[in-house]
Amino acid sequence: MTRLTPTGLAIAAVLVLLLALLTARLQRRLGGQVLIAALRTTVQLLLIGLVLDVLFANAHLAWVALLSLVMLAAAGREVRARQNRRLRGPWGYSVGAISMFISSFAVTVLALVVIVRHQPWYDPQYAIPLLGMLLGNTMNGVSIAMDRFTDAAWARRGEIEARLLLGQTASEATSELRKESVGAGLIPIINAMSAAGLVSLPGMMTGQILAGSPPTEAVKYQILIMFLIAVGTGLGTLAAVAITARRIVDERQRLRLERLAPSRR
């Protein structure tokens, strides 16, 4: 694979800078967000590259588990930050983290042990990239679903309270909102699977082809990854919406929207 030069990366950075300047003319805050995101990408990827160099040379289950938990903690923070009306207190963070732990970690371990079957199964060369792809996509689905659910619950609070007063359970009163929210959370991965191979060549497949792998082998791994991401995103979204729905209704079947923080928009 052809090595990238600092000049090549600098050209790409200039293009991002131009994008930030163009978007800043429309909205100054948006241009700043582009620059901050680009800076975070650069710093975070450089740091994880150094960490993985060390981890690959000293593969041990404890170190892999520690890095995995750090990744989960960061993903939980991102889920919390992307919500307009998040749950107050520790629940605003823990719902996303718990749902991603249940889904992404379970699917990753299953894939490593049953499908990939590399020895040792926790080899960071396989475990960390696979977990990273699942966490990243599950994080998007969970954050979209939770944001959609809490906003809809606030906007339709009168409807939910009426259903509860008519004797419906909390599950019945919020069923439509939960369906809509889970559907919204699954839109990105459904779109990605629908467009794969026709509109886009997914990242893992592209990377393997650039690294010299046969296209047919790269395709098999990409299909596996897409299926795992879909399952992880689906399970995480279902868990996050279910937990959030339980939090906004108390044990006496009363709507408790004071458990949501004020709108940030």
Image: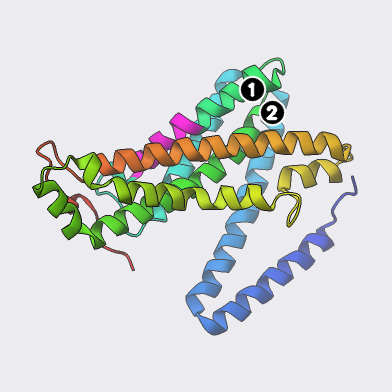
Which quadrant of the figure contains the C terminus? bottom left
Along the horizontal axis of the image, is 154 left or right of 31?
left
Along the horizontal axis of the image, is 248 left or right of 232?
left
Query: Which residue has dot 1 on it?
Result: 112
Residue 224 vertical placement versus 90 (above, below): above
Q: Nearer the viewer, residue 112 or 239?
A: 239
Mark 1, residues whose alpha carbon is within 10 Å: few (<14), some, or many (≥20)? Answer: many
Identify the amino acid type marked 1.
Answer: Leu
Q: Nearer the viewer, residue 150 or 128?
A: 150
Q: Quadrant of residue 213?
A: top right
Q: Position of residue 151 (x, y in %)?
A: 31, 59
Along the horizontal axis of the image, is 189 left or right of 118?
left
Residue drawn where x is 27% and y is 49% of the image:
87
Q: Quadrant of residue 117?
A: top right
Q: Nearer the viewer, residue 13 or 108?
A: 108
Q: Main secondary structure of the magenta part?
A: helix
